[in-house]
Image: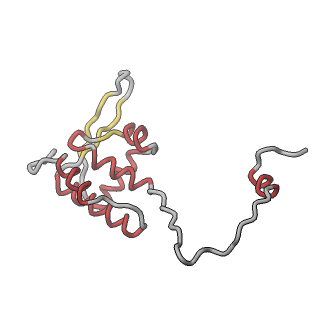
Amino acid sequence: MEKKNRPVQQAANSDIRTSDITPTTSPVQVPKRTPKKHRARVYMLRTGVEGWTENDILRYCRLSSGRNYASELERQLDIQLERIDEKNPDGIGAHLRYRFSCRGDVLKVIQLVNHNAAINEHHGLSQQDITDILNLYPDAFNAA
């Protein structure tokens, strides 16, 4: 009995012949996929003084365990995020809303994001992105 739609069988049955010689004149760079942590951290930065919830990370970044990304930032950068208990709209349960405590913490996260982007060879934050993010946090911003 033949199983249908199996990748192994499809590959075995296909008769596509390609050269295993790669072009030397113009190598094609396949862009690296943006890491999950990068997506989460950039989202966190772009929320401004309003902050984010665990559900926001799930909804907008398609990542689960939103609190883990916040906790890791705190451990890695020795910063303290402000946590606000926020009731769910249906009145059942609550989630934490996280936000940066000061503009200095925001700068630390920006540096980490760009440092990791350089190491992992994916796009970091441009100068315009950094300016836009910093405009979300007033000069005298201090949440605590």
Residue extending farthest to the left is 140
Is 108 displayed left or right of 31 in the figure? left
- In depth, the one of 19 and 8 nearer the eye is 19
Residue extending farthest to the front is 25
Is 29 displayed left or right of 98 in the figure? right
Q: Is residue 85 above or below residue 114?
A: above
Q: Residue at x 40, y 40 (%)?
A: 60
Q: Quadrant of the N terminus?
A: top right
Question: What percent of the width, then of the height, locates residue 83?
Answer: 26, 42
> What colour scheme has been applied to the protein in the rendered image?
secondary structure
Report the number of discs: 0
Q: Residue at x 30, y 55 (%)?
A: 74
Quarter of the image where one finds residue 21: bottom right
- In depth, the one of 94 and 8 nearer the eye is 8
Question: What percent of the width, then of the height, locates residue 91?
Answer: 35, 22
Q: Residue at x 38, y 50 (%)?
A: 40
Is 99 displayed left or right of 88 in the figure? left
Q: Residue at x 25, y 37 (%)?
A: 84
Residue extending farthest to the bottom is 24
Question: What percent of the width, then of the height, locates residue 54?
Answer: 37, 40
Q: Quadrant of the C terminus?
A: top left
Q: Is residue 94 above or below residue 141?
A: above
- In depth, the one of 136 and 64 nearer the eye is 136
Question: What percent of the width, then of the height, locates residue 11?
Answer: 76, 56
Residue extending farthest to the top is 90
